[in-house]
Amino acid sequence: MQCLSFIQNHLYLIGSLYYVLLCMILYVVHKESHRIILVVGCISLILAPIAEAMHVVDWWKPNFVFHTFINIEDLLFGFGFAGFSSGIYNIFKTKFRLKENTADIKWQIKMSVVIIFFMLFIGLFYLIKICSFWTSFISALFVIVTVLTIRRNALVPIMITGVVVLLTALPGYIIGIGINPAWFQNEWQLGFLSGITFLKIPIEEYVWFFVSAASMGAMSELLGNNKVFQEKTN
């Protein structure tokens, strides 16, 4: 009973471990994605605690195991989610484009996009006072649009990445509600959300998973060894 009670009260930890497991599986079975999984995962490792500090203000207040300044759940989820998303993108982009000798994205552009992304993410929330949902959405959209401006042929794999990762999240939400029917009532700040739900899940969760995963795919295109990819010509 104590074990069940722990799980009911720490579903964020369980979900974080779920994405770490998916990331590890992808890392093992798809060797071509090793580098990008680590690069994007480590960037998100830095971003996750910053994002959580915003989300607990007006989105949700999950139960943490230790309630420290930086929580283990945020680090696990940040790395696992981003690493898994980048690996999924890396798989799908090879299915839609052939290897060609195209120019790599200049490192100055790569660094500029990453820096502007972090500035947007922090500035929109703390300076302009936009809620954390829209802060996340706008920042992620910036990365997607910027990368698509440079690599228009990345559209399909980026969108597929968003859909695939979203689909992996749905079982977790459904199982979580089954384990703890009051999960959303207890840990989400529903008064700040739209009130629109599907399968008892707030619509904001669907949007966040899709757009965030798509942006991780775009980040993978930006930071990866993208010089070998181009549109199929036959």
Image: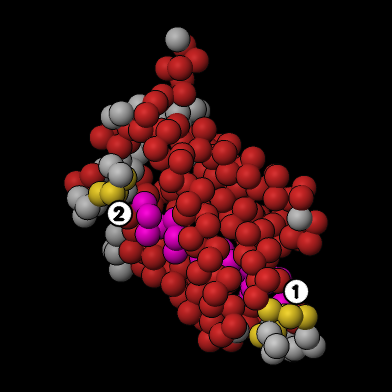
User: Could you say which is closer to the camera, residue 14 or residue 68?
Assistant: 14
Residue 43 sits above or below residue 22 on the image? below
Q: Residue at x 39, y 38 (%)?
A: 174
Q: Label 1: which residue? A: 225
Q: Is residue 67 left or right of residue 30?
A: left
Q: Is residue 68 visible?
A: no
Q: Nearer the viewer, mark 1 or mark 2?
A: 2
The disc at residue 203 is 2
Q: Which comes before the other along the chain, label 1 or label 2?
A: 2
Residue 223 magenta: yes
Amino acid at the residue labelled 2: Ile
Residue drawn at 57 percent across, 38 percent down: 18
Q: Residue at x 65, y 75 (%)?
A: 96
Residue 186 is situated, as x and y percent measured from the top left of the image, at: 28, 32
The stretch in magenta equals 205-226
Element at label 2: helix
Expressed as whole percent of the image width and height from the top left, the position of residue 94 reads 70, 71
Image marks 1 and 2: residues in contact by CB distance under 8 Å: no
- What is the spatial separation of the Cα atoms under label 1 and label 2, in whole angstroms? 35 Å
Q: Image check: 223 left or right of 73?
A: right
At which x and y percent is residue 63? Answer: 40, 31
